Amino acid sequence: MSAYPPTSFIARRAAAATRPMHSRLRGVRDVDQRIRAMEELAVHWLIAHCIAILRVTLGAVFFGFGLLKFFPGVSPAQDLVERTTDILTLGLIPGSVALVGVATLECVIGLCLIVGRGLRGAVYLLCVQLIGILSPVVLLAARLFDGPHGAPTLEGQYVLKDVILVGAALVIASTVGGARLTRTTAPEGAPQ
């Protein structure tokens, strides 16, 4: 062979074919080890930061939806909020007042979650808010599931997606009580 490294694809393939099999497999193992190391870094980063990211994004959702309710006719949930509150309060609170109250509640919850201050109070407010968010499923079921063959309407889908908010709120609530995310199993190949 020449003293110069092969430059063509065919020459490189021929050179690779002459290397022993264990040498070629080592390259595959090296790539696999690099991929596993990157996965491990990603897992460590997620363990350290995912709860905070969930808290901030949940706060942003609540703040954004609350902010929309301050402007009449802007929030797609305005009529649903007014109707649900009317039923829950037996008509004692006017719809416009209820809308401002819900908007304020959502914005306060959102800001507390985004900033990370007053989380215990925010969790209690969140419990009240989540009852209000999901109560249309019981109180206005006919309106929410009026699609073909009882399928959810757009409003029904809007309310049903709030189940995700409930799950995220439960995770945040558990961290206020001291829970934290940890790895329960050792990574593959790690000493035990």
Image (spheres, helix red, strand yellow):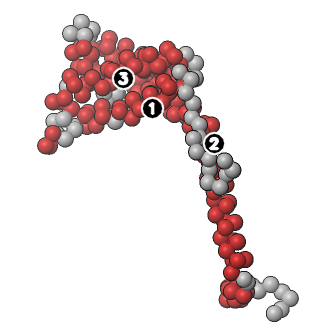
Task: Find the residue positioned furthest to the left.
Answer: 149
Task: Kindly identify the amino acid type of the residue bearing the numbered disc 3.
Answer: Leu
Task: Kindly identify the amino acid type of the residue bearing the numbered disc 1.
Answer: Ala
Q: Residue, x 35% and y 33% (percent of image)?
A: 163
Task: Find the residue positioned furthest to the top.
Answer: 92
Crowding at dot 2, Cα within 10 Å, few <14 / some 14-19 / many 20+, comes out as: few
Q: In the rendered image, which residue does mark 2 sit on?
A: 45
Q: Are marks 3 and 2 in contact (CB under 8 Å)?
A: no
What whole-number distance in Å separates the C-alpha atoms at marks 1 and 3?
11 Å
Task: Find the residue positioned furthest to the right.
Answer: 3
Q: Which mark is residue 168?
A: 1
Quarter residue 189 falls in: bottom right
Q: Residue, x 64% and y 63% (percent of image)?
A: 32
SS label for mark 2: helix
SS label for mark 1: helix
Quarter residue 160 falls in: top left
What whole-number distance in Å separates the C-alpha atoms at marks 1 and 2?
19 Å
